[in-house]
Amino acid sequence: MTTDLPGLLAQLYLDEDIHKRVAYALRLRGFDVVSTSEVSNVGFSDSEQLAYAVAEKRALVTFNVVDYVKLNKEYLLSHKDHHGIIVSSQLPIRETIKRLLGLLNEFTADQLRNTLLWL
């Protein structure tokens, strides 16, 4: 069970563009990370993916920069909250893991809330 207390580690939700081995590697290092395939959300629309992340209090990670930048703007204009959107250009698995580890060690869940970050 999660809460929104300051200082808590961010929990991540990797969209289907991010290889599921990234989730596995991050979990081995003690982080709470799931991928779309692990929760049977493959094929969901971008807005459905973000809604799922919001419901689960997870920051969403994606290589789909254009669509999620738009969704972030829509959320902000509609005064809807999310738990963070992390976008990146396509990266090799090892580099994705390295950058996400850096981000997870730098930002708390509270600091990611309603934030769009470039990985």
Image (spheres, helix red, strand yellow):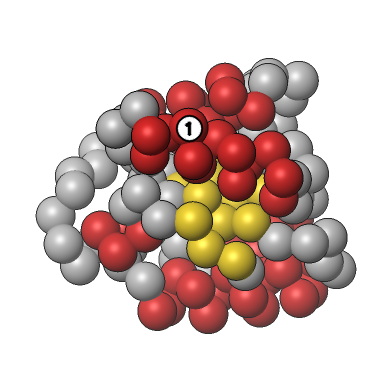
- Above or below, 35 relative to 42: below
Name the quadrant of the N terminus. top left
The location of residue 58, given as percent across then percent down, is 42, 44
Relative depth, front residue between 64 and 55: 64
Residue located farthest toward the left when viewing the structure as drawn? 5
Q: In this view, does 38 lie to the left or right of 71?
A: right
The kind of secondary structure element at disc 1 is helix
Q: Which residue is drawn at 25% across and 58% down?
A: 110
| Viewer-nearest residue: 92 or 112 | 112
Query: Which residue is rendered at x = 57% and y = 21% of the image?
Result: 48
Asked if 62 appears above or below 70 in the picture, the reply is below
Residue at position x 49%, y 56% from top?
116
- Nearer to the camera, 20 or 115: 115
- Report which quarter residue 35 is drawn in: top right
Question: Relative to residue 76, is residue 65 drawn left or right?
Answer: right
Q: Residue pushed farthest front? A: 77
Count of numbered marks: 1
Which quadrant holds the C terminus?
Answer: bottom right
Does residue 12 appear in the picture of this structure?
no
The kind of residue tagged 1 is Glu
Residue 112 relative to residue 86: left or right? left
Residue 6 is at least partly visible in this image: yes
Q: Position of residue 54 (x, y in %)?
A: 39, 33
- Residue receiving disc 1: 74
Q: How crowded is mark 1: few (under 14 residues within 10 Å), some or many (20 or more)?
A: few
